[in-house]
Amino acid sequence: MPKTDLAPVSALDLSKTFSCGQCFRWDRRDDGAFYGAAYGRTLKLWNADGRVFCDAPGADLPFWRRYFDLDTNYAALESAFAGPPWLHDCMAYGRGIRILRQEPWETLCSFILSQCNNIPRIRAIIRTLCVQYGEKLPHGLYSFPDAARLAPLSEAAFAPLHAGYRAAYILEAAKQVGSGALDLEALKSLPDEDASAQIKTLPGVGNKVANCFLLYGLHKLGSFPVDVWMRRALNEHFPPDFDPLTLGPGAGLAQQYIFYYEREHGKAPKRENCDCCDADQSA
DNA sequence: TTCCAGGACCGGG
DNA sequence: CCCGGTCATGGA
């Protein structure tokens, strides 16, 4: 098994990156390493000597460096953050998070499923979906089933997923994306407002899901999803008329720092654990 | 039993 | 534009 140096842990914090709410399919296993899949490839990651190592062959390194967004200058984005000192506490706490360049279709489905749902259950639904309809990959992993694979399924076939009313949303999205009527890749080249308007024509995709799709699926870092956690944070720490767009082209990164900080500290309703979230990750 | 979860949608005011 | 009810599911 190859051992390839991917990045310093100061630039890529695996625990934070995988548990900050942007993705649902990376797991930390009993051996202490993280496992996941994207674009048909799998990866095992672990920390050693202040570095992040992975089992990818050297030839795949450019792919994974891009997936982990290692060539984007976050310090430059952060320099435009104008907000209360509390925002800088969030930044300091969350530094090491990278905004992943996830598969657009997987991201769209994941955040359609996320609505009015909790993170452990979202993860469970997605896991079942991949085991049922994805392709088998190394490390006991599965790919996320593509739209054409899901499009012909019936709602009855979705029943075992316990996705509830969201199943119909997924099926309709699968039909439109699978048939080519809606080209997710093409949305990358559109202005944020146009890409957002396009994706919101899908049933079950409103403002919040659209923003998550733009940020995590299209890597449009100016997108600023506001959910119940973000709403609480904005109400408590920002002026009432605060406009997130004033945070600049990295507003979505600021959002991620805030969301992560709130979920780790905010004892608002309650705390919950998922298998990627336990924080005692020793280098 | 009631409330909540990374909401969306539809109706009425 | 904003408001309340509803949608399906499971954990606390």
Image (cartoon, coloured by chain):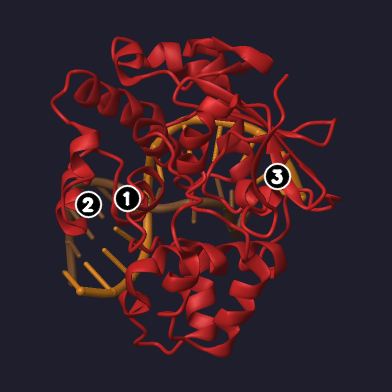
Chain colours: A red, B brown, C orange
Q: What element carries label 1?
A: helix
- State which quadrant residue A246 falls in: bottom left
Report the chain holding disc 2.
A
Name the residue type under label 2. Answer: Ser
Q: Mark 2 points at which residue?
A: A196
Q: Residue A37, can we see it?
A: no
Q: Please give the name of the residue rendered at 13% of the width and 26% of the height, measured from the top-left corner.
A: A181
Q: Pinpoint residue A204: horizontal percent, then vertical percent.
A: 31, 41
> Could you say which is closer to the camera, residue A69 or residue A122?
A69
Q: Is residue C7 left or right of residue B11?
A: right
Task: Of the two numbered discs 2 and 1 on the same chain, state the one appearing first in sequence.
Answer: 2
Q: Which amino acid, mark 1?
A: Leu
Residue shown at 60% from the left, 54% from the top: A20
Q: Which of marks 1 and 3 is in front?
A: 3
Nearer to us in this view, B7 or A90: A90
Question: Of callouts 1 and 3, which one flags the residue occurring earlier in the amino acid sequence?
Answer: 3
- In the rendered structure, which amino acid carries the disc numbered 3? Val
The numbered dot on residue A52 is 3
Q: Which mark is residue A214?
A: 1
Percent of width and height locating residue A66: 45, 42
Mark 1 and mark 3 residues within 8 Å of each other at the beta carbon: no
Q: Element at badge 2?
A: helix
Residue A242, position as x, y percentages in the image: 37, 84
Residue count near mark 1 (Cα–Cα under 10 Å), binned few <14, some 14–19, many ≥20: many
Labels 2 and 1 within one chain: yes
